[in-house]
Image (tube, rainbow, N blue to C red):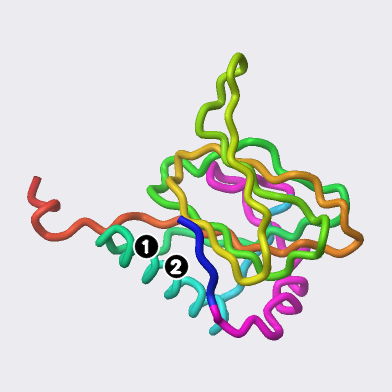
Amino acid sequence: MRGTTDVDLTGLAEVLLEHKNNRLDPEPSHTHYEDSFCPDHPIVDKIVYELMSAFRAASGLDLMLHSKWAHIHEKNMSTNIHDHYPCDVSSAFYVSVPEGSGNICFHPSHNKYHPTREVFQPHEGMFLIFPGTLEHSVTRNHSEQPRISLAFNFTIVKDEDDKRD
């Protein structure tokens, strides 16, 4: 699912850049070297609310935030193919997207004999919501400016009837 939000992002890039060197501890859902701490912040809270609302509108399902972090890609940085298993749903949200700063690529069939990929050129305020098991990568940032995005992992909230099973 792709969408755009009208959340006012003023000042968010600066807040995230302040935490650029605060790295996360490696875990399976993080891509390690480019993952930065994403502080609690009212703008981030609004983004999370919009993502969960968009997912609910499209699927009828509720989400619970599992984890969040920032990606700050400087010139020549990229991200290799990875997924966010075991999380149910993942999302990328774009805070700052200078021209030439790279695309996100989804790899629904990572078959070396017949690879497929879907490429999305991000823009500020754009979000993508996708299954946590979907492999994806980010192409190289050729811009002199950093591309800043937020990454979120969610768990699908089971209703009471599902909990009894």
Q: Overall secondary structure of the magenta stretch?
A: loop
* Picture mark count: 2
Instruction: State the separation of the CA atoms marked 2 and 1.
Output: 6 Å
Residue annotated with mark 1: 55
Left or right placement of residue 51 versus residue 146 in this view: left
Q: Position of residue 125 (x, y in %)?
A: 61, 71
Residue annotated with mark 2: 51
Q: Nearer the viewer, residue 121 or 8?
A: 121
Q: Which residue is found at the position 53% from the left and 40% from the top?
A: 83
Left or right placement of residue 123 versus residue 2 in this view: right
Contact, CB < 8 Å: mark 2 with mark 1?
A: yes
Q: Secondary structure at mark 1?
A: helix
Decide whether residue 48 is among the magenta residues: no
Q: Which residue is found at the position 45% from the left and 45% from the top?
A: 132
Left or right placement of residue 110 versus residue 19 in this view: left
Q: Secondary structure at mark 2?
A: helix
